[in-house]
Image: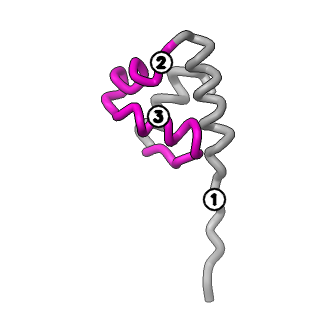
Amino acid sequence: MKREVARFDFKAFGQAIKAARKTKGISRNQLADTLNIAPRYIASIENSGQHPSLQIFFELIQRYHI
């Protein structure tokens, strides 16, 4: 018997991060540098709704009050 696993759609989260980042005038490269991650990773979170790691998720929530 398969157990159903609830999944969260991160597309809305990614769009909120992108909007907050742009409002503050911060580029993807600047954000990636402060978080020590690749700018492509930020792009994937913002555009594709990729699930961020727990640490990155927490840092983005704190940084942009989402």
Of labels 1 and 3, the one closer to you: 3
Of labels 1 and 2, the one closer to you: 2
Between residue 20 and residue 8, name the one nearer to us.
20
Asked if residue 22 lies left or right of residue 57, the reply is right
What element does badge 2 sit on?
loop
**Amino acid under disc 3:** Ile
**Amino acid under disc 1:** Arg
Disc 1/disc 3 C-alpha distance (Å): 20 Å
Magenta span covers which residues?
26-53
Q: What residue did someone put label 3 on?
A: 42
Q: Specify which label sits upstream in the sequence, 1 or 2.
A: 1
**Amino acid under disc 2:** Ser
Count up the numbered dots. 3
Disc 1/disc 2 C-alpha distance (Å): 29 Å
Dot 3: within a 10 Å radius of its alpha carbon, few (fewer than 14), some, or many (20 or more) residues?
Answer: many
Q: What residue did someone put label 2 on?
A: 27
Q: Residue at x 65, y 50 (%)?
A: 9
Q: Is residue 41 magenta?
A: yes
Between residue 28 and residue 53, name the one nearer to us.
28
Q: Residue at x 59, y 27 (%)?
A: 18
Q: Specify which label sits upstream in the sequence, 3 or 2.
A: 2
Q: What residue did someone put label 1 on?
A: 7
Disc 3/disc 2 C-alpha distance (Å): 10 Å
Between residue 38 and residue 20, name the one nearer to us.
38
* Residue 21 percent location from the top left of the image: 56, 19
Q: Residue at x 64, y 43 (%)?
A: 11
* Residue 15 percent location from the top left of the image: 65, 33
Q: Is residue 66 above or below residue 45?
A: above
Q: Is residue 63 above or below residue 13?
A: above
Quarter of the image with the C terminus in it: top right
